[in-house]
Image: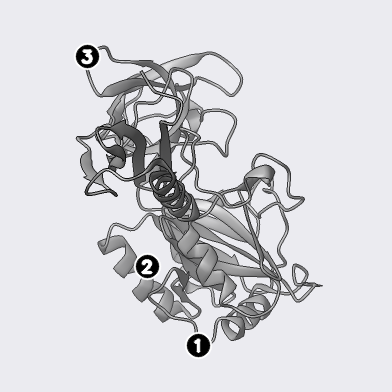
Amino acid sequence: MITENEEKISLYYNEGRSDKVYHVHLNSTAGGYVVNFQFGRRGSTLQSGTKTLAPVPYEKAKNIYDRFVAEKKSKGYTQDEVGTPYQNSEQAGRQSGLLPQLLNPVDVARVDELIADSHWCMQEKKDGFRLLVRKSGHVIEGINRKGMFVGMSTAIEQAILEIGGDFVLDGEGIGDIYWVFDLLELDREDLRDLSVAQRFGKLSLLLEGSSSDGAFRLIPDAWNPSAKRKLFERLKAERAEGVVFKNMAAKYLPGRPTSGGDHLKFKFTATATCQVLAPNEGKRSVALGVYQHPGESLVEIGNVTIPANFRIPATGSLVEVRYLYAHVGGSLFQPVYLGERNDVDVADSVKSLKFKQGEDDET
């Protein structure tokens, strides 16, 4: 039983591959009060510690407890079990008015053409979450692919604060690192009508002098055929997620074209957004489904194991899974769980899956 002066709180941090928890307790004991805590990856054995080596008066213990909780919240921990670390909590879930440009995929046959074409540049495609960042004075706002305000790592926020001027950036967040690949606004000037080459030039000047190994980094890119081929082969050997091709004369147009376009992507590995059909009883795995056709019934495509550092997603959740290929009428081969998706509304369809070479995907 908790007495009137006792308190406890659970704080969560869930971003990229991080899924951590902190439990903090202010408890009465013989001789006064103590502040203890447990922490670690969610779902694993937690480590224990104390902020008071001996009991102290309530006022001192309360001060220690409040400062410790505030410190964790300043680093991105939140009381919401989803654990999204955001600084402007009153804005989370609200529309920002900004939308990113989305990419259409190309097959391997088109890749060689784009590499050889000097009118197209190429950038690495990172395996993170899409993140627009708007800086206005000392206010930093994170925005997802749906245009909604979301949280970001405190480390990313601090790195962006160190860059002068007001701007809107487009990039990928991976843990405590923000990989930036485009500049949309600079000191209240809209740059979307400029070409890719012009925007990238302004972005390079904006980031001049920034650390290349800190929380804020520029996406690796290549601009001529030989450099593109070299980068492509290196990324493929490193098992990167893929590459993005951009027409160097193209403007930035929010949304996704119905087909083709001036911003294209090619993935070395396949990923799918699946719906959790049900947890598997007694196991750290869930059954997955995608739509037979968009808007129709779900079909099961196998199971995926949930690593210990992730919580088990609930039935109906949307999750991202990496896999080698899919079997027609069967399951995903070598699926790897990447985490839950809160920036999309529906699962993929069978037609969007990557099938083993020689298998028909029109099932």
- Which residue is rendered at x = 42% and y = 60% of the image? 176
Mark toward the start of the polypeptide (2 vs 3): 2
Report which quarter residue 357 is drawn in: top left
Rounded to the nearest angstrom, the CA distance separating label 2 from label 3 is: 43 Å
What residue is pinned by disc 2?
A: 232
Q: How many marks?
A: 3
Instruction: Label 2: state its secondary structure.
Output: helix
- Which residue is rendered at x = 70% and y = 49% of the image? 255
Q: In this view, does 125 lie to the left or right of 237?
A: right
Mark toward the start of the polypeptide (1 vs 2): 1
Mark toward the start of the polypeptide (1 vs 3): 1
Image coordinates of residue 168 in percent, x first then y, are 68, 66
Q: Camera-side residue: 129 or 300?
A: 129
Give the amino acid at mark 1.
Gly
Q: Residue 209 carries which label?
A: 1
Q: Is residue 194 above or below residue 201?
A: above
Specify whether residue 255 is in view. Answer: yes
Q: Camera-side residue: 262 or 205?
A: 205
Give the amino acid at mark 2.
Phe
Q: Is residue 157 above or below residue 39?
A: below
What residue is pinned by disc 3?
A: 282
Q: Residue 120 carries which label?
A: none
Image coordinates of residue 284 in percent, x first then y, are 25, 24
Instruction: Label 1: state its secondary structure.
Output: loop
Instruction: Label 3: state its secondary structure.
Output: loop
Image coordinates of residue 302 in percent, x first then y, are 31, 21
Report which quarter residue 125 is drawn in: bottom left
